[in-house]
């Protein structure tokens, strides 16, 4: 009894957090390029502060990131050395369609990803591609208002048709939208939404979400038509919500908190809006343009598998006076039984087993953990080497419970790609100093550094984990 043969071990990144070269190769400007480092980051990502063009006062970490655009061969070779079976990466939409609404794609952008995929295959690495990891071409925001506009569905269909056709035989695993539930929490970064004064923000978010859900189902349909071998997944920012106590109002609160997230996956995995969602829209006077044909496309094109990120569990209570702590973007109640990372994200390995089981119980579809890891401060020695025992300990404990979920609980799990396998820009803070990688990248929060890559201690540890298919975690 062990991980199945062919279990997909690997690591994950996103274009906007590692590629850089934001204005090379014909790439157009995107929302993710203008999310600055520093105090304005959150207001911009939330759509509260309008920043549709970069200015001279801010530093924009995504513009260069770790310059993987020019280092991808070196980086993929290192993933190959670790023995990766898969590498999760995302496509920058504005590399393929610089404006987003063109008919013809930008060949240079297509060629870039083709080279990346071919490089992966050289090492026996299966690409796992996120079609949209938070990014949206700026032109689609300025001209159409981002995902609030139904027209985005057609532009997205055009994008995916090009991708599935061009990369047929090179890519088999696809994710339509990264952390689709993040649209509620980071609406500009996640869906290109900027709010006008007095706008019904909740309605705008669910409207944008509806368009993404339909676009996701359309993409699933097109993927299967172009190549029946394609496997399409949804992607949830997961982590079970625990009731703070056994008080029924805490249990009720926790159930409803989870529904805020499950709503999206319920649609993508089951093919229709659940009753509680319909009631929410009614209660909050949220008018969505759900057409008959939307309902049909959602119903007929559910996902093949469910992928998710897991950093921590969450906690909820009916009592509003309990203190909160940071979490993956949205804060949660402090769980007194858990320790936390330097950024306040609580560490809960058993929570991963609980999350795996609850997702599997709810959907009965194969699962894929596509993000997990510890964001920490690393202190390299004079050669750039980091002894990151804290990261190894975090990963080890999580892999143990993942193993238990597979071996003892029978959860069907296709793979595990830890987040930020090479150090990259933090999505929430824009820092470089919040590191997740097995590979250290010499660059700081202000953009200084040589970009030199150096394997950390965890690099050799993870290599052994993969070599033994998860048997040797020591
Ligand atoms: C998820 C995102 C990633 C990523 C990760 C870690 O929400 O999908 O893009 O960055 O969280 O978060 P952070 O970078 O804020 O530490």
Image (cartoon, rainbow, N blue to C red):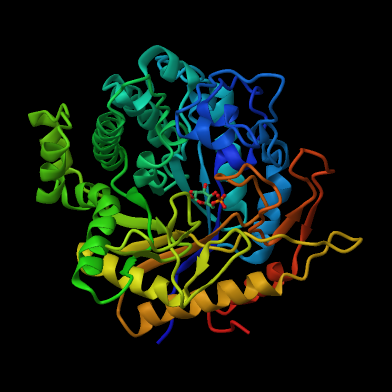
The residue positioned farthest toward the front in the image shown: 321
Q: Position of residue 255 (x, y in %)?
A: 23, 62
Q: Residue at x 25, y 77 (%)?
A: 246
- Rendered location of residue 183, percent (x, y): 37, 39
Residue occupying the far right of the picture:
382
Tell whether 135 sits left or right of 443. Answer: left
* Left or right relative to 461: residue 262: left
> At x 39% / y 33%, what residue is drawn?
165
Residue 293 in the image: above or below residue 180: above
Query: Is residue 457 toward the left or the right of residue 158 in the image?
Result: right
Nearest to the observer: residue 258 or residue 463: 258
Question: Quarter of the image containing the C terminus?
Answer: bottom right
Q: Nearer the viewer, residue 422 or 226?
A: 422
Query: Is 280 or 132 nearer to us in this picture?
Result: 280
| Residue 352 position (above or below residue 292) | below
Is residue 412 at all visible to an observer of this figure? no
Residue 184 falls in image quadrant: top left
């Amino acid at each position: 009894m062990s991980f199945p043969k062919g279990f997909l071990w690997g690591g994950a990144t996103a274009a906007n957090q590692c590629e850089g070269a934001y204005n090379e190769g014909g790439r157009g400007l995107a929302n993710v390029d203008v999310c600055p480092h520093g105090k304005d980051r959150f207001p911009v990502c939330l759509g509260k502060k309008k920043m549709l063009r970069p200015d001279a006062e801010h530093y924009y970490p995504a513009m260069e990131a770790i310059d993987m655009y020019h280092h991808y061969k070196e980086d993929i070779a290192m993933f190959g050395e670790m023995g990766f079976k898969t590498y999760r990466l995302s496509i920058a939409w504005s590399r393929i369609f610089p404006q987003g609404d063109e008919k013809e794609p930008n060949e240079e952008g297509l060629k870039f990803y083709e080279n990346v995929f071919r490089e992966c295959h050289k090492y026996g690495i299966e690409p796992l591609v996120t079609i949209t990891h938070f990014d949206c071409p700026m032109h689609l925001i300025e001209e159409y208002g981002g995902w609030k506009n139904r027209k985005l569905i057609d532009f997205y269909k055009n994008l995916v048709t090009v991708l599935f056709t061009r990369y047929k035989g090179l890519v088999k695993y696809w994710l339509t939208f990264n952390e689709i539930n993040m649209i509620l929490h980071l609406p500009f970064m996640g869906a290109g939404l900027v709010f006008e004064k007095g706008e019904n923000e909740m309605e705008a978010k669910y409207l944008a979400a509806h368009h993404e859900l339909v676009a996701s189902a359309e993409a699933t349909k097109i993927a299967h038509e172009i190549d029946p071998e394609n496997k399409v997944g949804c992607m949830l920012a997961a982590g079970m919500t625990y009731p703070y106590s056994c008080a029924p109002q805490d249990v009720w609160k926790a159930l409803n908190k989870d529904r805020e997230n499950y709503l999206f996956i319920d649609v993508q995995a089951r093919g229709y809006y659940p009753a509680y969602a319909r009631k929410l829209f009614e209660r909050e006077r949220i008018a969505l343009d759900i057409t008959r044909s939307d309902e049909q496309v959602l119903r007929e094109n559910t996902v093949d598998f469910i992928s998710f990120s897991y950093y921590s569990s969450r906690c909820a209570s009916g009592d509003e006076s309990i203190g909160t702590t940071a979490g993956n973007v949205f804060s949660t109640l402090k769980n007194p039984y858990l320790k936390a990372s330097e950024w306040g994200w609580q560490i809960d390995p058993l929570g991963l087993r609980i999350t795996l089981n609850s997702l599997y119980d709810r959907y009965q579809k194969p699962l894929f953990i596509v993000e997990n890891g510890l964001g920490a401060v690393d202190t390299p020695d004079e050669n750039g080497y980091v002894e990151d025992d804290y990261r190894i300990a975090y990963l080890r404990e999580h892999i143990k419970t993942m193993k238990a979920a597979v071996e003892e609980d029978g959860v069907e799990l296709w793979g595990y790609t830890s987040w930020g396998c090479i150090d990259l820009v933090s999505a929430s803070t824009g820092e470089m100093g919040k590191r997740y990688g097995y590979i250290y990248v010499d660059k700081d929060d202000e953009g200084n550094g040589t970009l030199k890559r150096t394997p950390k201690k965890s690099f050799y540890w993870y290599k052994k984990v993969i070599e033994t298919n998860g048997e040797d975690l020591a």
